[in-house]
Amino acid sequence: METVDEKKAWEETTKLFKCGTFKFGPHWSFNFRNDPKRLGFVLSRYKFAAKMLGKREGVLELGCSDGIGATILAENAEKYVGIDLDEPALKAAKENLDEDKFVFKFDDFMGKTYGKFDGVVSLDVVEHILPEFEAQYFETIYSNITESGICVVGTPNITSAPYASKASHLGHVNMFSHERLITTMKKYFHQVFPFGMNDEIMHTGYAPMAHYIFCVACHKKEVKDD
């Protein structure tokens, strides 16, 4: 029986790892050091969003942070555009993903258009938008998506607020229930499909017991300007 040199075999394997290292920005460095399991939760959210989108020409992410979900969202897309106001996080994203397929922009996306995308994703963002500006947030999603596009919005459930961290209590200024998120998104889309999440597990179970909530929406309505 042939003897395998494990060290040599591993050295040959590492020659396949031709990409550079991936470094977190300040936000995700803090999360990974202080609550590492959260990375698993968040990557699972991106995996779900990508599954719902399927193959896309272009994906726009509103609130991309360090870009930790960009490669998942872009895996079956021809291009990816990520927008965020967190400049240190965007710096990390640009350094990690400097390929032509990825575009990261430092901008306040509210009320702006970046083109027409057949996939729009915004996770862990709307809870940071003050209630008086939430309509503009959803209108921004609406104005950037094609007629046949799919959007995925995710946010912590309001029922999870009593168990949230100090940082969450400081930053989360607009919490949604499943019902309110569905009702809001139905103003802009004909089809809205709700989902719940606990840890990494997606489900369609009893909504108040979901820690995190999603709505997947498609088939834009004709929305008239006031």
Image: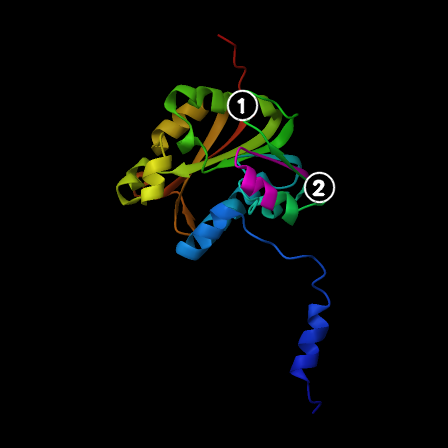
Find the distance from the CA under tag 2 to the CA under tag 1.
Answer: 23 Å
Q: How far from the left and from the top, in percent, is residue 65?
A: 53, 40
Q: Residue at x 35, y 40 (%)?
A: 168
- Which of 194 and 102 lies nearest the eye of the viewer? 102
Give the quarter of the image for residue 164: top left
Residue at the image point whose x is 30% and y is 43% from the top: 209
* Badge 2 density bin: few <14, some 14–19, many ≥20, Cα 10 Å: some
- In the rendered image, residue 153, in percent from the top left (x then y), is placed at 48, 34
Q: Viewed as shown, does residue 74 lie left or right of 108?
A: right
Viewer-side residue, 223 vs 171: 171
Label 2 or label 1, whichever comes before in sequence order: 2
Q: Name the residue nearer the viewer: 107 or 163.
A: 107
Q: Residue 22 bears which disc, if any?
A: none
Which x, y percent locates residue 156? 38, 39
Mark 2 touching mark 1, by CB under 8 A? no
Residue type, mark 2 in image: Lys
Q: Is 31 positioned to the left or the right of 89 in the image?
A: left
Q: Secondary structure at mark 2?
A: loop
Question: Is any atom of residue 210 visible in this view?
Answer: no
Residue at image mark 1 = 140
* Residue occupied by mark 2: 101
- Color scheme of the displayed model: rainbow
Observer able to see residue 221: yes
Name of the residue lying farthest toward the bottom: 1
* 167 lies above or below 19: above
- Look at the image and say whether residue 220 sits in the magenta stretch: no
Instruction: Name, please, the residue furthest toward the left.
Output: 162
Amino acid type, label 1: Thr
Please give the range of residues in magenta.
78-92
